[in-house]
Structure formats: structure tokens, C-alpha cells
Amino acid sequence: MRIEKEQDVVPFRNRVKEYAVKIGMSLVNQTKLITAASELVRNMLKYAGGGTVLMEVISQTRDTGIRLTFQDKGPGINDIALAMKDGYSSGKSLGLGLPGTKRLVNEFDIKSIVGEGTTVSILKWKNG
């Protein structure tokens, strides 16, 4: 799904919710996933001018989850370790973004190349 402007955020959130409902994710876990996804999609818009999100339903052993992969061609993140610290902000926000997002999901992976872009992948298990 392409994210190019602020107006793309609500349809994106609705699509994430549809996927979560379809796999039977609890309301609490839906809220965590949608909150994390909203933070990442807003970062993608703010810092990279948009990008794409891949949504996948993942099944492993006895659990099912949703993986979201956010890709942008923005400026990249110079220091990922610093960006992952609570309280750090490159903008004028509270700095809850990336570390807060990581706490809301079961798996979180970030790769960034300065001048090329950033890819963030999150996974939330239905029962996790």
C-alpha cells in the first residue's frame, strides 16, 4: 500500500484493523498494532515524504500474526542506536516513537542506509 499524503493514514489504519479482525486478534492487541503502525506511518510521511507498507498474515506453529513492513526512500537514520533510545527525538516530538513502537509489538526490526532510506518491520502475534 502506497502512503504519499496524510489522507492515506486513515485508510491504512482501517486496512490494518481489517486484517487484525480477520485473524481474530484481541481488541487490546489490535490497539497495540494499530498504534505502532500509526507511529511508523507518520514517521514515514514526516521524515521521508511517504513510502510503501507491505501487510502480511503470518502463521507459525499454533499462532497467527500480522507483519507490517514500512519502506521509504528518505534520508535514512544516521544513528539507529540513538534513535532507539527513550526520549530521543530528531524532531519536536516527545521522542516516544521508535522505542515506544518496539514495546507495542512482538518483533521489531529496523534497517537504514543514510541517503537511501529506511525499512522497519513489525510483527504482532494474535495471542502475544
Image (cartoon, rainbow, N blue to C red):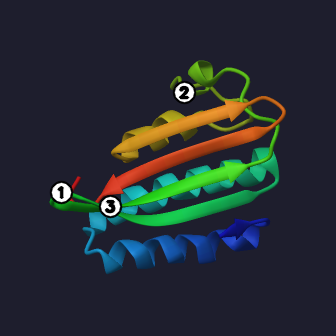
Residue 106 x %, y % = 33, 45
Residue 110 x %, y % = 56, 36
Q: Tell me which label, 2 or 3, sits earlier in the chain.
A: 3
Between label 2 and label 1, give the one nearer the viewer: 1
Between label 2 and label 3, give the one nearer the viewer: 3
**Quarter-wise, where is residue 114 in the image?**
top right
Q: Is residue 90 visible?
A: yes
**Alpha carbon of mark 1 to alpha carbon of mark 3: how far?**
11 Å
Under mark 3, the amino acid is: Gly
Q: Determine crowd level at label 2: few under 14, some 14-19, many 20+ residues with C-alpha closer than 10 A.
A: some
Residue at the spot 47% in from the left edge and 43% down from the top edge: 101
Q: Tell me which label, 2 or 1, sits earlier in the chain.
A: 1
Q: Check disc 2 and report the residue beneath it.
A: 84
Return the residue nearer the eye: 71 or 31. Answer: 71
Between label 1 and label 3, give the one nearer the viewer: 1
Residue at the spot 45% in from the left edge and 40% down from the top edge: 108
Residue 29 x %, y % = 31, 60
Residue at the spot 41% in from the left edge and 58% down from the top edge: 33
Residue 60 x %, y % = 24, 57
**Alpha carbon of mark 2 to alpha carbon of mark 3: how far?**
24 Å
Q: Check disc 3 and report the residue beneath it.
A: 65
Q: In this view, does 52 lie above or below 47?
A: below
Answer whether labels 2 and 3 touch (C-beta < 8 Å): no
Q: Which mark is drawn over residue 74?
A: none
Q: In this view, does 14 lie above or below 56?
A: below
Under mark 2, the amino acid is: Met
Circle 2 — which element? Answer: loop
Residue at the spot 27% in from the left edge and 69% down from the top edge: 25
Q: Which mark is drawn over residue 61?
A: 1
Return the residue nearer the eye: 65 or 88. Answer: 65
Under mark 1, the amino acid is: Thr
Q: Determine crowd level at label 3: few under 14, some 14-19, many 20+ residues with C-alpha closer than 10 A.
A: many
